[in-house]
């Protein structure tokens, strides 16, 4: 019988790519998603590509009765927990909604897992927990918690909650994965990132300028102490990220406790480097203007990935050009996303 996995937030950007990777690796997948930031179409397309569908349950992770029932109905062995609200900007405006959604959904999930004797959990954390890094590349033992916004604090609080949980009961096997900047899409161009409204993140914004739904990119600051003055980030292909989850799942099944891994490439690229590379790949101009720095941004943020390489036997493989090529294939073939 196939290993059965519950994927929370599996209709979303990273969850849909990871669901596909799980199906391709012969897992059975149940997705629970309330579609608050996604579309069912992503999972239909995942099913087309894989030739096998995940079971989709539309519902909210904060609904304890529903979540308990899912564990009663299905012999789930492990959970990948992606479901969360993720906009930094929105979290500053609506902190309670962010804490309520992100914390309460994780608590409900962990309670239901413990009741069902399911203890393997992979959690989507973020480099945002490092706050303003005191040193780059950032290793997992860099201090955390000096986060600059409620979204980041919700991730930090969940990390602490999961660590306390694992201390309380040695049956828990928990991976905390700190993603750097996920970009790109499946090479088919059929699934990809489709944020609601005007994107906050660089790549989706550039993609929309390239297809003409937005007119011009604002580059937030060109006076940082970086190679060209613009912000430097560690962009990682979403397919590399998806594979990192499979490696983390294998690793925790052999080891109790909480384990933290950075998932990045270890390489930093500036905003201008990304813009130039994207223009070359898409053959479209990306008009931009330099705007003031964005509140809460840091100059440079990239990962030390040696722990993940050593302990997971995992390494990111895609280059920046390949990430941009795949992001552009998705956006150019789906100019309106899933709509
Ligand atoms: P996404 O918004 O595309 O996916 C999240 C999914 O969770 C959505 O489909 C949404 O509908 C669902 N969801 C939210 N609250 C829910 C709830 N209460 N019940 C059920 N479903 C719910 O985001 P993503 O980019 O795929 O991010 C996935 C995870 O990775 C999130 O936890 C996010 O915080 C984390 N992360 C993302 C990034 C990034 O840049 N994309 C970076 C670091 C960490
Ligand atoms: C990248 C670079 C911007 C948009 C965020 C979250 C983080 C994580 C990933 C979830 C920066 C610059 C951006 C634009 C720009 N998400 N930029 N013009 O800020 O590194 O990380 O997403 O966990 O928590 O904070 O990503 O893509 O927004 O920005 O100049 O319109 O692009 O200043 O240097 P960031 P980003």
Image (cartoon, rainbow, N blue to C red):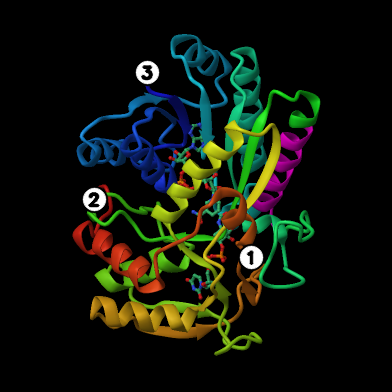
- Callout 2 secondary element: loop
| Figure quadrant of residue 289 | bottom left
Does 41 appear above or below 142? above
Does 315 appear above or below 251? below
* Crowding at mark 3 (Cα within 10 Å: few <14, some 14-19, many 20+): few
Q: CA distance from mark 2 to mark 3?
A: 29 Å
* Crowding at mark 1 (Cα within 10 Å: few <14, some 14-19, many 20+): some
- Residue 72, given in percent of the width and then of the height, sits at 50, 9
* Marks 2, 3: nearer the viewer: 3
- Residue 259, given in percent of the width and then of the height, sits at 68, 43
- Callout 1 secondary element: loop
Which of the two residues, 12 or 100, is positioned nearer the viewer here? 12
Which of the two residues, 223 or 162, is positioned nearer the viewer here? 162
Inspect the magenta stretch and tell me whether residue 162 lies in it. yes
Q: CA distance from mark 1 to mark 2?
A: 32 Å
- Residue beneath disc 1: 304
Inspect the magenta stretch and tell me whether residue 86 lies in it. no
| Figure quadrant of residue 147 | bottom right
- Callout 3 secondary element: loop
Residue drawn at x 76%, y 57% is 141
Does 69 appear above or below 273? above
Residue 285 visible in the shown view: yes
- Residue 187, given in percent of the width and then of the height, sits at 26, 57
Residue drawn at x 57%, y 76% is 232
Of pointers 3 and 1, the one earlier in the residue sequence: 3
Quadrant for the N terminus, please: top left
- Residue beneath disc 2: 190
Magenta-colored span: 148-164
- Residue beneath disc 3: 1
Going by the image, does 305 lie left or right of 70?
right
Of pointers 1 and 2, the one earlier in the residue sequence: 2
CB at disc 1 and ligand 2 closer than 8 Å: no
């Amino acid at each position: 019988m196939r290993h059965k996995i519950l994927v929370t937030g599996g209709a979303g950007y990273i969850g849909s790519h990871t669901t596909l990777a799980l199906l391709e690796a012969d897992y059975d997948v149940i997705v629970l998603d309330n579609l608050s930031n996604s579309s069912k179409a992503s999972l239909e397309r995942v099913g087309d590509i894989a030739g096998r569908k995940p079971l989709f349950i539309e519902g909210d992770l904060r609904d304890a009765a529903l979540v308990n029932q899912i564990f009663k109905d299905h012999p789930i062995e492990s959970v990948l927990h992606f479901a969360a609200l993720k906009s930094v900007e929105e979290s500053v405006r609506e902190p309670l909604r962010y804490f309520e959604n992100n914390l309460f959904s994780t608590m409900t999930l962990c309670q239901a897992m413990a009741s069902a004797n399911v203890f393997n959990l992979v959690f989507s954390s973020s480099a945002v927990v490092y706050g303003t890094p005191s040193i780059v590349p950032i290793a997992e033992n860099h201090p955390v918690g000096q986060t600059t916004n409620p979204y980041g604090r919700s991730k930090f609080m969940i990390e602490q909650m999961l660590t306390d949980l694992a201390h309380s009961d040695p049956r828990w096997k928990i991976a905390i994965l700190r993603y750097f900047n996920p970009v790109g899409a499946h090479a088919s161009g059929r699934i990809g990132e489709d944020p609601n409204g005007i994107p906050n993140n660089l790549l989706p914004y550039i993609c929309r300028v390239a297809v003409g739904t937005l007119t011009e990119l604002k580059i937030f600051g060109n006076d940082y102490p970086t190679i060209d003055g613009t912000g430097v980030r560690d962009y990682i292909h979403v397919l590399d990220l998806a594979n990192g989850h499979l490696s983390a799942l294998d690793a925790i099944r052999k080891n109790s406790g909480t384990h933290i891994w950075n998932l990045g490439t270890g390489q930093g690229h500036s905003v201008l480097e990304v813009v130039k590379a994207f223009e070359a790949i898409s053959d479209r101009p990306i008009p931009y203007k330099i705007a003031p720095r964005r509140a809460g941004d840091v100059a440079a943020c990239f990962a030390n990935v040696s722990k993940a390489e050593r302990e997971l036997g995992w390494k990111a493989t895609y280059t920046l050009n390949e990430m941009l090529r795949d992001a552009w294939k998705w956006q150019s073939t789906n100019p309106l996303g899933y709509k």
